[in-house]
Amino acid sequence: MNSGIAYRCPLPDVQFETAWAAIKIDQGVKDRLLAQSMLALTVRRSVPFDAAPLHGLIVLAGIPGTGKTTLARGLATKVASMLTGQKVTFLQIDPHGLASASLGKSQQQVTTLFTQTIPEAGMGGVAVVLLDEVETLAADRRRMSLEANPVDVHRATDAVLAGLDLLTRTHKNILLIATTNYPQAVDAAFLSRADLIETIPPPNAEARAEIIRDTLDALARQWPKVAGLGRDMALFVTASNGMDGRRLRKAVVGALAGSLATARDPNLVTSQQLLAAIKAATQAGKEIGREAA
Ligand SMILES: Nc1ncnc2c1ncn2[C@@H]1O[C@H](COP(=O)(O)OP(=O)(O)O)[C@@H](O)[C@H]1O
Ligand SMILES: [Mg+2]
């Protein structure tokens, strides 16, 4: 039977920490996430639920590629570093694995997840649980898709809500971080239980400049002449307006594929090639957006 666990590891984790640092975003967002997480694992433990109904649930919402999954993992390790002396376990749930279970099974699996697997991970310490792409797990019951059996989706979402309520009232040593690319597809009752819903925006001009610089620097460690492209940063920043962080990093690296010569020797890559790669990626993004709309 699919346990629904995609990944599990002890925290803190150095790689998560590095990835968190690599996400360029307003420091206010990172600070809010950290403060809310600490509240969930400290204050929440000493105040009765009915007086301060904190569920220990944080939701990160935003378009794909904006760093939500990376931020969630980074947050987990940052929190663990602050809880010195406590055993902290990270658990990443694979909602697709659960939801694709044969009809009638997902409800039972979700219940097992919330009543056994997650509490067990937190035993003797703290568990930070990532519910990645939670729209699959807590699908809006009013918007059933045609492929899935509506009754089954309904029951699975009910099971998530029931599990969440029980878990968060009885296990105050557990922090849940959910991400979603489609907040409108997540059940409203799930969202209303969040202590904080943080919308993660696509990178602004300053963040895009940092992402481009960071990616160029990484390439320049191997091919030093790539660093020279930084001179035309203003052009790249303007051309990448609206692009998400993942595609922007890909576009910068993708510039090396501008010709066979640069693919063989990245030291030869030019500003024009980088600008063309960014423009092509921006254009492709717009077309996909238009089709999806
Ligand atoms: N704001 C950002 N700053 C730097 N890198 C970013 C940013 N947003 C996305 N990325 C890059 O995109 C990759 C994918 O991010 P991910 O966390 O999977 O996004 P999401 O979960 O929102 O789809 C990250 O590893 C990172 O390299
Ligand atoms: Mg993600």
Image: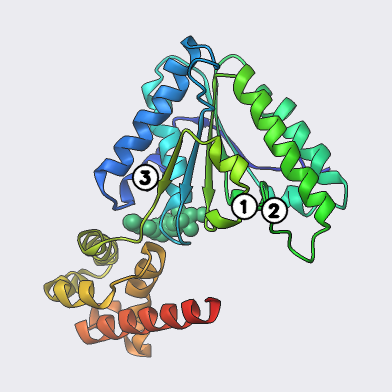
Say which mark, if any, is on residue 135: 1
On the question of residue 228 being in view, the answer is no
Residue at the image point whose x is 33% and y is 36% from the top = 32
Image position of 254 (left or right of 139): left
Q: Dividing the image into four equal quarters, which quarter contains ligand 1?
A: bottom left
Q: Amino acid at mark 1?
A: Glu
Across and down, in percent, residue 38 comes to: 40, 24
Using the image as rendered, state which of residue 261 and residue 178 is in the foreground: 178
Q: Amino acid at mark 2?
A: His
Mark 3: which secondary structure? helix
Instruction: Verify CB contact (< 8 Å) between mark 1 and mark 3.
Output: no
Instruction: Verify CB contact (< 8 Å) between mark 2 and mark 1.
Output: no
On the question of residue 202 being in view, the answer is yes
Sequence-earlier tag: 2 or 1: 2
Q: Nearer the viewer, mark 1 or mark 3?
A: 1
Across and down, in percent, residue 130 comes to: 56, 40
Sequence-earlier tag: 1 or 3: 3
Q: CA distance from mark 2 to mark 1?
A: 10 Å
Residue under pointer 3: 20
**Quarter-of-image position of residue 28:** top left
Residue under pointer 2: 96
Q: Is mark 1 within 8 Å of ligand 2?
A: no
Q: CA distance from mark 1 to mark 3?
A: 23 Å
Residue at the image point whose x is 39% and y is 52% from the top = 200
Instruction: Verify CB contact (< 8 Å) between mark 3 and mark 2.
Output: no
Across and down, in percent, residue 103 comes to: 87, 52
Q: CA distance from mark 3 to mark 2?
A: 24 Å
Please state, as top left, top right, bottom left or bottom right, where the N terminus lies in the image: top right
